[in-house]
Image (cartoon, grey):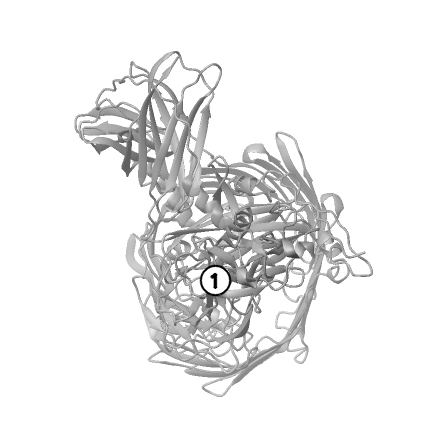
Amino acid sequence: MFLFRRHCAVIAGLLAAFLTARAGPSLYAETLPVTPVSIPGHTVRTGGSEDLTQKVKVQSYEVEAGKTLSIPASKPGFHLVKTPEIAVVAETLPNALVIKGLRVGETSILVWEAEGVKSYRIVVVRPRQERMLIEKTVMQGSKLYQMKRARSFKVYYDTTWSFLNEGRVLPRATEAQKIYNHRVRSSGRTPYGEFDGSLFYEYRKEHEMEKSVAIPRDFWGGLYDTDLPLLKHYDITAGEQFVSLSDFGFPGERINGISLLPSSSRWMSPKAGQLDTSFFLGAKRDGSMIDNPAGIQDRKVKGNVVGQRADYHVWKNGTVSLGSFHQWNNQRNEYQSKNNYNALFDFRFPYVQLKGEGAFDNRIRPAAQLRPIFQNRWSRVEGRWFSVDNHYATIPGTVMDRGARGYQTRIDAFPLMPFVNSDAIMIDGDLGLVRNHLSVNPDRPRDYVKLAQGGVRWRLPYGFSNDFRMWFVDQFAASFPYTQKRFNEVFTKDVYFRSKWLKRSSAFISAAYDAYRKARNTPGFNSTRWEVGSGGSLYFAGGWYASARYYRNELKELDVWTSPSKVTYPQQFVVEGGWTHAFRKIPMSVNLDVRYSKDAQTYGKIHQPFLNEERLEGRTGANFYVRDVGSLFAQVRAAMIRSNIGAPDQAEFSFVTGLQMMWDTKLYVPQSGRIEGAVFEDRNANGMRDDGEPGIMGYEVRIEDGAKAETDKDGFYSLKVREGQVKVLASGKLPEGFYFTTPNWEHIEVLPKTFSRVDFGVAPQIQVRGHVFVDVNGNKIFEKGDVPVAGIQIALASGQMGVSASEGFYSILRVTPGPNKIRVVLGSIPQGYKTLVPVEKVFEGVAGDVINYPVILAAQRTASGYVFGDDNENGKFDPVEKGIAGVKILAGDKTYTTNRSGKFVIPDLAAAKATLELDQSSLPEGDMAVVTSKELETGTGVFIDNAVHFPVHISAKKDSE
Amino acid sequence: MPKMIVRIAVALGIFSLSLGTGVRAAEEPAKTGGFGISISPSIIRLAGKPGESQAAEVRVWNKSAQPMQVFVEVNDLGNRVDEEGKLARVFLAPGTLPYSCAKWILLNESECVIRPGEYKDVKFLIATPQDSSGGSTAVVFFRGSTVQNAEANSGTAESPATSVEIQPRLGVLVFLDVTGTVQRTGNLQDFQVTPPAEGEPMKIQYVFENAGNADILVEGSFFILDQNQALVAKENLNALRTFPGDRGASETFWDSTLAPGRYHLVASFELGPETTEVIVRETDFTVA
């Protein structure tokens, strides 16, 4: 029995632990004298009996911190609060409990009511406003929210009221105006593009003319960066707009009409073979971008225009274009053409860009230009060769360089950058050789106007900086011939302070030389001017500043008849001070500025550098703004001007106030995105789709409470989903024997017009399982009396392992189909046991197969001993006593015979109980067995008894022999 | 001399290889002192339908000054009953326990190298079988080994490697509830109160049997009222985490004094997490 118990303990292993746990400890219970304790509101209980234990279902409630909650109750009496720091019972009513939340957390309350004990779980949450603020903050951080916000329709309203009075204060009145503007603009993103529209309405009254006008000044609306089936990334606009499509073909015209132009995103990211179309149609409109506020414009339309341009991208960075432009019903002047046609190209290569344009008008007069551009990290050189017919005309009437031909170059460079990667020195320059046939010096008809100008700016250590520029202009080939040379130098020093009051100072000195020569018949034009100047600024804490500067010139006119003085000394003195401040506690900023300037000895010379006046000017204003809402502003300006050349004194005054408002309607047009992916057979179960892993056809994937789709032959699916948070899940039924190797659902934030990829991997599996038990009766069937065995290890050739559990069962999942081999880990079989089945088995399964491999153990039950002559008749086998050979021992239906030394071995005893019987007849004649039968308690486990002896009394005859 | 690798796994609080203290290591936030690894979170609780698969992620920090090779291992999570009838945590081979979800866990990677002061998010997947129900548990262990030692341990026959290494191991307890099938219920047995006497603290003992099909965290508290119905004491009982079929004892010592007299004790046991059932026990006792 000892052996049996020992082996059972080993075999059962963990099973024993769990089974014994069921028995549990018997806790010592102190017997307590019990006297009822009275608790108000509930029945008095006494201890020591099971009826004191009650199972209560928990009811959950939520209350905000600092607020109360009424819970329905039935005659509530006594109560106990687990954590009164979180919530307390504020009041007990006959039919309710009033709970007050104190701080965020969770507690439970036991209440003895008429119906018995009740348990309430009270969750105290943050106050609603605080939660909303947190939710809002979190929400505002999401990309989807920001996109919605960006797309929502917003309305802007600007209004300005202006009063301009020049000359009213002093007698010389010049002009007074009142202008009242309203501008309403709205923008928002639609599924088809960005909508933007504006209405600009104006009221204007002029005192001098006693006339007022109220008229829409401009009105337009459009869909930008479109997303339409045949028109992706175009800007479609209707209303008033300025259209310009090239320098010579259609330089620019303000029209009332429609236009279709490639959007910037289309133009910036072209593809080879892409064809872009530009088109406009409308009536010509006076003015350029907006009306001139100085007077009442003639807003009449003047004829109609239409134009188109086709851009073909030969390769990604190579574009050729053809355009044609026409107008009709329009009275044209000599500078205006009825039709224009042009061709353009724009080829871009690394470091080099080449573009050009050729155009002609309705009289086949040509205009052309070529622009080579060389550019690298630190320099840019752009050249322009052009030739424009003397009478070339365009539809708007404006022509750049009409009648001119020549070459111009522009250079910009950072010369230190290639060596020390510094932008401390910057140089720029222009060179030009131009002959304008419409403005020719008859003495030099074949000469070119020459221009050379350039400059260098560099930063020096310790806050010094220097700016030097020079010009050379030779206009001798032009109809007004002259030459000019000019040099200018400014040297500046900035100093920053850590003082409490003074923050920064800046000082400069400057010098200039300016010489005009070779002008004819223009008294006073040929001259030489020298200038020196100096000044400084101080910037104080709190936004205060002050500055002063002084310039002195020597202007020497060279024409001998210029009088009264050939040499003058124009001067200017300027002093200025001000204050700008943005308040912290209120959303408001103010500004104040006073400026005084005095010009002296100007005398109205042609090249005198200053105005002829003494001016005192002041400005002040305030701006009150509310974030995301708008601002209110007002500005006042007043100036007094005294002429120093005898003109009448005058004063100016203006007052401008206005309101700018923005209203985010938060309305947006919902849009859709896509969720795409595949359901695939993840053969290596790594959660990713690798090459060669096929898709699974016909599997359902759906959005929770939404659309669904089935995978195609490649396992691919695609779902169109409205923007927002969705849960996409592989909802189809898995094929038998498959399992997911990826999450089969995922939360996705669907953004408009984007797609998210979600793949679902499934892998085939077979399951290997079996039962490990000790087959007590050896019939290889688990039945009553057989013993489950825990802790036996089973291993697969594919690497997985399983261990039999408490009831002897084991299961190995996720086994890849295909050839495999299962084996019992022999080391896990305890001593004394053998297997009744092969210790390994080869199998080949397909997905869904369940391979059954039972491990049947048999306990070793053996007995051995001696049949011996008990010479000393003590009933025990002593080593000196001799065994008797050939004696038969019967065990069940088997017979065993002792060997020469009298030993017998019975290798396979019956379970539970076995009887060994000695065959008396097999003893030598005369011998008599002391014991002829032995009962053995073999049990169900291992039984080994090597001391089952049968003593025999040897006959006296033999003894004597 | 045959290759000999000596590894001493030191059970230092959170770095535990022992069965009993390993529980504590997993349930408490990992503490570090410039040595070893730390993980977050220490408990992952998932809920899903049968057949669903769900992803989980654990952030593993290398708090040491050397690159750390981290091995990821999955075990069953359960309890055994010790000689005193108390429950002690055990970590067994995957699939050993009937309520194990260890065999459903697919690791994205079983080992990785984390540089000093950096972290790595280790992901794994739990693919629930179609026929699953109730709650199931597992533990995912992260065992760290310095890269140098890992390389040193791979010595050759000619140059046998010998190293002594302290390997920190942290576990993340994984609980998976199959939605709609979980029953958290249990029975309170052998509830005993031993009043304080002669310097001995008051002792409250009970045996809890998890009669449901999911893990239960028993969080108890008790209230002591005197004969005037005044609350004299309130304290929490030691928490007890049980698994389906567990039956184990717990005891709490309350080291305080009570004036002689008669008292009424109310103990409540919340069967959590997400408590839906409470067991209320009332009894009287006398302090001599």
Q: Camera-side residue: A752 or A919?
A: A919
Residue at 62% of width from left, 40% of height from top? B32
Looking at the image, residue B258 lies above or below residue B276: above
Q: Position of residue A846 (x, y in %)?
A: 46, 75
Q: Say which quadrant the C terminus of chain B sits in.
A: top left
Looking at the image, residue A504 lies above or below residue A29: below
Question: Can residue A191 be seen by looking at this rendering?
Answer: no
Q: Camera-side residue: A94 or B201?
A: B201
Q: Camera-side residue: A351 or A440?
A: A351
Q: Position of residue A448 (x, y in %)?
A: 67, 76
Q: Say which quadrant the N terminus of chain B sits in.
A: bottom right
Question: Can residue A18 be seen by looking at this rendering?
Answer: yes
Q: Which three-letter amino acid code belongs to the residue tagged 1?
A: Gly
The image quadrant of residue A478 is: bottom right
- Which SS class for mark 1? loop
Could you tell whether A155 is left or right of A399 in the image? Answer: left
**Residue carrying label 1:** A892
Residue at 62% of width from left, 39% of height from top? B12
Could you tell whether A874 is left or right of B234 in the image? Answer: right
